[in-house]
Image: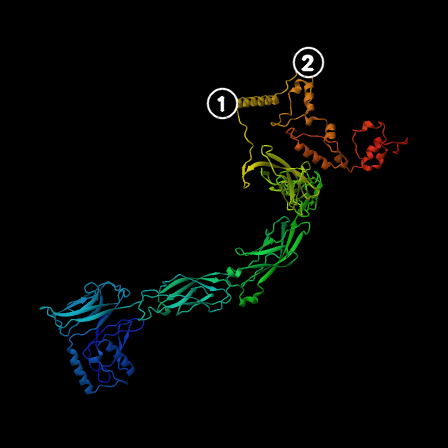
Amino acid sequence: MTGDQRSANIVKGDCHSQNLDLSWTFQRTTHRTYFLLKGPKILCCDFKVSPSKRMWTSGRMSNAKNLLGLGISLYFWGLMDLTTTVLSGSARPLTEGQEDNLSDKLHQRMKRSWVWNQFFVLEEYTGTDPLYVGKLHSDMDRGDGSIKYILSGEGAGIVFTIDDTTGDIHAIQRLDREERSQYTLRAQALDRRTGRPMEPESEFIIKIQDINDNEPKFLDGPYVASVPEMSPVGTSVIQVTATDADDPTYGNSARVVYSILQGQPYFSVDSRTGLIRTALMNMDREAKEYYEVIIQAKDMGGQLGGLAGTTTVNITLSDVNDNPPRFPQKHYQMSVLESAPVSSTVGRVVAKDLDEGINAEMKYSLVDGDGLDVFDINTDPNYQVGIITVRKPLSFESKKSYTLKVEGANPHLEMRFLNLGPFRDTTTVHISVEDVDEPPVFEPSFYFVEVPEDVEIGTTIQMISAKDPDVTNNSIRYSIDRSSDPGRFFYVDITSGALMTARPLDREDVSWHNITVLAMELNNPSQVGSVSVTVKVLDVNDNAPEFARFYEAFVCENAKAGQLIQTVSAIDRDDPQEGQHFYYSLAPEAANNPNFTLRDNQDNTAWILTRRSGFRQHEQNTFYLPILISDNGRPVLSSTGTLTVHVCSCDDDGLVMSCNAEAYVLPVSLSRGALIAILACIFVLLVLVLLILSMRRQRKQPYIIDEEENIHENIVRYDDEGGGEEDTEAFDIAAMWNPREAQLVVKNRQDMLPEIESLSRYVPQACVMDNNVHSYVLAKLYEADMDLWAPPFDSLQTYMFEGNGSVAESLSSLQSVTTDSDQSYDYLTDWGPRFKKLAEMYGATDSSGALW
């Protein structure tokens, strides 16, 4: 920035005839040149400035349009009103009248003494010398130094200084328009000698001229945006905005132009607005999902030399449902155990979908196959897989394999992509059922049995049947769960499954039995099946009726004949279907009782009536009346109950006063102490008698030892294992001391009796004739359990009882002594192949060796 004085010849009409003192300053920017024109005369001229040479290149009259523009500029600087006349139209010479008017106006301008409005200075000046801003000058200044210029206001003396003699203003600090765009100062011209103001104080402004020293910046960057894949070209993605700190009203320093440096050809950006759009069609997320786009913002309208800033925009393609699901396998092979429970998982199938989120959701279903009613499929929402489950129980023996056709489909579709194909796919699943060793199965699955309570021990009440569902069909062994039959009332045959009674049944004690029968595979004892058997015990008339309670009647001495003295009732533990009905009568021995009679009311009660009057307590104070009670069962059962009748003394109203006979009066001479002594003696005698009896029962027979016999030379065989700690009779050491005494002891032991004797003693004749082994053994077992004198341990007894059904009948040799020793065994040839060997050994043969 420099100041200079130039001369221009201005003549009326052609601007060339008169010298003009011209002080000027200018600033070159990208858009305009500012002028400060000052002098005594200025006519309408158009001045052009050469920025490179910083000098006037021409000064001539211009047309009306340019003159109007110059007039506006001069008016802006405060010079237009007195010194300039703007002529409309083309330039023409001034007339003498116009020149006189101009001369008058110049005379009025001189009265203002000094005038300025504002100065301009460039920011960011980097020179070493102070930056010249402008010059203050007063018309009273004759150049002799008598005027002193003073500068005050914002930045005076700190940012700006003034030469108090010449009025030159300089900037002594580097200026930044972005920090402060203008300063308001005040100027004063003083008389140097007196300090008196020569003119009024004037205020002016120094504006900081902007230069392009700030690049555009993206204050919100980096940016993140998303756009649906397969979007049409030109789809808006996001708008970016850059901010330039330079003056937007001055030149092109803040005029920003956007461009894309990275991200083509996928995206484009609007150079004016910064709006980013898609530039490529059919962008596929499955091929490329993330894009990094770099946007540049350059000032100076994007021209060479402008400053630029960049930002990054991370763009993600969001998913749309443009990919149909597809099974990676067209055939699946699965297997499941036949013992798999309902709702258990068989296997999983999955259809791949390149989409994600809701667009990859899948729904699986069974559309065909022979297992639609046996299997089911559910969709796992977390992993989008199809889970095949068991719907019904499986059986390897019934069906060994199934085939299913599974479909996977997207439930959420987009209509614009339906042309890409059906958004569903199918696959085939083959399921093999594997055999497992299953427990036996009962047929039927529940048993209900009704049994009369008088059924004999060992009677078969139900045949329980179970079979192995496996192909191998193993043998079955039956048993009873003893926790369901703690009383051991029943027994089941281990091979046939025949359920029998093992103890007598009594409906009055237990009317219902709920037992569990177990079936176990012989080859695999871990496989056990069970079935519930409910046994209802039917009633039979096996209980005689009896009094409902103990009855005790009272009759007054003054009672009359036919008077009711007691009402009796009975109970019966039986429960006949037609209901209870009891019949009452006096026992046969009391049928002709002269004192009392009985009336059956036919409602299960009976009245006891007096037959006579005049009872005397001192003659007989108690009567015992036997009453016969019968039921209506089949057979009819009856019992006799005794009614005790006391004769009492009563008042006139019949109220009992006393039922005891007159007490025996003791002699007066017998004192109370003597009576107590007698009773004490009697008590002592009773105690002694009881003690003697007790000692006799506990006394044992003395051991008899024959001193003359050496027991070491005798061998006694005692083939009994004993019954444990609680067995006090299983082993007697006396048998080792005296064999003869041991024989006597053995006679009193039931468990050591000979088997033949046991058989003949305990086996009923009916059992021998029936030949039912189970009934016989169960009866013997019950007999042993009920025997209170049996030793408390298990013993093994051999019963030579063969049962029925044998073709050979009995093979026992117990009765062989009654027959001839030479027997004929020819009949063995008729018994079949099982007895062929015996027939060869004992059968008759001819001389040729042939068997007859």
Task: From the image, tell me which residue sits under label 1.
Answer: 673
Is the residue 146 above or below the residue 660 in the image? below
Q: Is residue 828 left or right of residue 175?
A: right
- Marks counted in the figure total 2
Is the residue 492 above or below the residue 108 in the image? above
Q: Residue 179 carries which label?
A: none
Task: From the image, tell me which residue sits under label 2.
Answer: 709
Q: Do the residues labelled 2 and 1 touch (CB within 8 Å)?
A: no
- Circle 1 residues within 10 Å: few <14, some 14–19, many ≥20: few
- Image quarter of the N terminus: bottom left
**Dot 2 or dot 1, earlier in sequence:** 1
Closer to us: 278 or 822: 822
Image point (37%, 62%), residue name: 220
Is the residue 516 above or below the residue 760 in the image? below
- Circle 2 residues within 10 Å: few <14, some 14–19, many ≥20: few
The disc labelled 1 sits on which kind of residue? Gly
Q: In this view, does 344 lie to the left or right of 636?
A: left
Q: In the current view of this chain or complex, which residue is farthest to the left?
A: 194
Residue 22 in the image, given as x and y percentages of width and height: 21, 76
- Image quarter of the C terminus: top right
Residue 747 in the image, given as x and y percentages of width and height: 69, 23
The quadrant where residue 190 appears: bottom left
The disc labelled 2 sits on which kind of residue? Glu
Image point (60%, 33%), residue name: 620
The answer to whether residue 484 shows anywhere in this view is no
- The local secondary structure at tag 2 comes to loop
